[in-house]
Amino acid sequence: MRVFEAKAGLIQDSSGALYGTTQAGGTKQEGVVFELKQSKGSWEETVLHSFLGGSDGSHPYSDLYMDPVTGVLYGATYDGGSKNCGVVFQLALSGQTWVETILFTLGGSSGCNPESGLREDASGNLYGTTLTGSEYGYGNVFMLSPTGGTWTQTVLHSFTGGSDGAYAGRLDLNSAGVLYGVTFSGGLHNDGTVFELTQSGGSWSETVIHNFSSSPDGSDPFGIRLDANTGFLYGTTEYGGTSNLGTVFRLTESGGVWSETVLHSFSGGSGDGALPEASPAENVDTTEIFGTTTEGGSKNVGTVFSVKP
């Protein structure tokens, strides 16, 4: 069985095992969830689930999320499901076997084509985004809540494609329950946004905290990470910057106002990299930021980079 096209990042459990997804490959060429464990100095791969392309979903683009208490894995597929708009799934270990459960099937007003991973709050609610679909066709931010063995979706915000953004990417969540995310497009300059969603009185409201303008600050952001220690937001843009090959940026809040700092503009070539599509690594801090690019490097197939603010 050939496994390939890993577009999502990896996560790690307390034992050091790594978990990830591939967009394609597997028994039906619809993608897999895999585990990597280190043994005697080498890494061994185990395929935990091969997607079949039907009701169980297909083509997972997104990162996985692991519940730190139960070890259950949560993820989403880009398409497949009964409406071919993707599913939100759970993988849980039963004995020695990982079993997939479909938590929710996307489509129509619930949104379509999730490209980004899920986040979980202290109450067990899951949060995610869709790239398309929902009320205006530009995707949404949603919450899935477990109730009596079933999961109920609530759409927290449907993007209009205007000043509020369009085509949502990855989310992050702080300890107070505030959600942070990016949109690839929309905003004042149609180059994407960083937004926050806050809850008050049972309703959610969106605030755009940064509008990208291509140069010098970037455009088409995909990833965002919250540094829980500092409250800084770190992210990448696929395009824009001084060479239109993407940026690494930081957002800092002071007195309710967010300010952006471009930490690096990619220039391509063997010594740098170009077009980052993934979020910075999970363990971001103020001393070093790690990530990947999809192009550039000595063979023009991407790089792993480090940026020191």
Image (cartoon, rainbow, N blue to C red):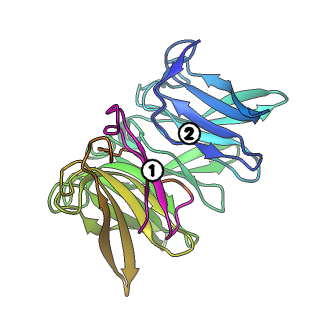
Query: Does 289 appear in magenta?
Result: yes
Report the side of 109 relative to 219 (left or right).
Answer: right
What residue sits right under mark 1 in the picture? 291
Mark closer to the observer (2, 1): 1
In the rendered image, which quarter contains the C terminus? Answer: bottom left
- Looking at marks 2 and 1 on the same chain, the residue that comes earlier in the sequence is marked by 2
Give how far across and how far down residue 84 sits, in percent.
Answer: 41, 25
Give how far across and how far down residue 215 sits, in percent.
Answer: 16, 60
In this orientation, does residue 158 appear?
no
SS at circle 1: strand
Give how far across and how far down residue 106 sits, in percent.
Answer: 45, 36
Quadrant of residue 270 in the image? top left
Query: Does 303 appear in magenta?
Result: yes
Residue at x 45% of width, y 26% of height: 5
SS at circle 2: strand
Of the residues shown, which amino acid type is indicated by label 1? Gly
Q: Nearer the viewer, residue 127 or 106?
A: 127
Q: Which residues are magenta?
A: 283-309
Reply above or below: 102 against 26: below
Of the residues shown, which amino acid type is indicated by label 2? Gly
Report the side of 257 relative to 32 (left or right).
Answer: left
In the rendered image, which quarter contains the N terminus? Answer: top right
Mark number for residue 75? 2
